[in-house]
Amino acid sequence: MSLPTRTAVAVLGVAAVSCALVGATASSAVAAPGNGKSALAGSVPSWAQAAHKVGASDKNTQVDFRVYINNRGGEAAAQLATAVSTPSNAQYGKFLTPAQYRARFAPTRADVDSVSAWLRSQGFKVGYVPDNHKYVEAAGSVAQASTAFGTSFSDYTVQGKTLRSNDTQLAVPNSLSAVQSVIGLDESAALLQHHATYQPPTGTRPGQPCSAYWAEKTISNTTVPGVTFPSSPTAFAPCGYAGTQLQGAYGVAGAIAAGNDGRGVTVAVIDAFASPTAAKDLATYSAAHGLPAPKLTERVAPGIYNHPTTRRFDPSGWAGEEQLDLEAVHTMAPGADIVYVGAPNNGQPLDAALNEVVDKRLADIVTNSYGWAGEALPPGYIKPQVDIQIQAAAEGISVFYSSGDAGDETNGVAGATPSPDFPASSPWVTAVGGTSMGVSRDNTRLFEVGWETGRSALVNGAWTMPPTYQYGGGGGTSRLFAQPPYQKGVVPASISTTQRVVPDVAALGDPSTGMAVGQTQTF
């Protein structure tokens, strides 16, 4: 079946994302709190405020977390990644292999061994360490974490959720000076969300009447008994664009027919969970819309604990996002190989999935349709992800993130602070925004505009006006990252002259004018 919804975007033919030095600081050791330990700056989430505290966390709760380790050479990796991604630089295009990157910049085995030994001495079970030595994974109880990191843990209310956080900054032994941050002890990861505005419930079909192409059905030629429609818009939403409609609208149908269809390129799609029908659904969808048989590989990043998902999205919601992403990539690059890398939940394992793709160079392009609603994250969450993005740029891997589907994240609330979403706001990735688009009967693009959807309700025979904001393409000016060189002189000064601006590019994202998605459902 097909559902109209937003599309994920993979842009082919890009050797490496343009890069800039990051304006955010790493979470690192600062003044010692005593007992031979140093605090990790910025390790308390901004949402863990006393006014929102509910009470002490259950000390018996099991936690899994990662201790991230700083790269060697300070900013040397970022400088190299910038050089190989800048056309005017003599090093442009001279990308490193994963082995070369590790040899020059990765944390040492001695750093890993020191961290692992200390974790074991505190009673934690030490788990997976990736080949680039970026982190050491461990598991234990809240009580063990409280003792080891010199803090207490409490539950706080945030965005309608009750989440655990350390009450004070985490502390580690002074001897572990290479430690960058600790991720997973607080539950900031529960605030991460996928960027599909439409999560299909059981047995959903496109709403009727809908159009096969833009304005096939309009108010003037279609009637619904008992309903009088507003004067605008006059066209009924498409049932969902697919196949040659999208290829024609973006002017790539001729190139694809001539063989420039993404062959020789591998695109990685990262999402949480893994739909058991994904491969079959992609094959069925491809046959139904005139696409060649897909070349799909599915894998799960190793060394990831399967911790509970009770405070996170249900896997069925992410299944729709997975299907959307796979079908969008295959539609626009039908010759490309696709590797789906699934995280066991939508917490920090998504970071591990990206690290797996980059450190093993499983793909040339990575597409991600998820992120945090804004940039209000502990620095310890941000710098480790940025480091992975820097490694990707150094290896010539292009990383794309959806810019979100909630505009500037103010949701119409007066006085709220506008913000783009992270990781899309990182200058080391390409942020992809959303548009609304009309496709003609002959598969040409009639119009494409920035996406913002309003909603009116029919109440006692009258439509509520003006429409209320429902959703729209994410973006804005970053408060974390300085303006990268590739935006200087490009972004209008009225928006920003000093800070990173999102998005970089945009494509069809509006679910009301969106892509058809095929997914197995139960009726």
Image (cartoon, rainbow, N blue to C red):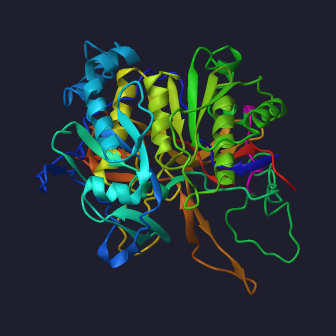
Secondary structure predominantly adopted by residues drawn in magenta:
loop
Give whichever of 491, 282 is nearer the camera: 282
**Residue 295 seen from this side:** yes
Part of the protein shown in magenta: 237-244
Give whichever of 331, 390 is nearer the camera: 390
Residue 297 picture quarter: top right
Give whichever of 142, 235 is nearer the camera: 142
- Verify whether residue 429 appears in magenta: no
Assign the C terminus to one quadrant of the image.
Answer: bottom right
Q: Is residue 409 left or right of residue 229?
A: left
Q: What residue is rendered at 49% in x and 28% in y? A: 357
Residue extending furthest toward the bottom: 460
Q: Is residue 309 left or right of residue 124?
A: right
Q: What residue is rendered at 79% in x and 46% in y? A: 2
The spot of residue 163 in percent (x, y) is 44, 65
Q: Is residue 402 left or right of residue 25?
A: right
Task: Work out whether 454 lies above or below 124.
Answer: below
The spot of residue 433 in percent (x, y) is 50, 46
The spot of residue 461 in percent (x, y) is 76, 84
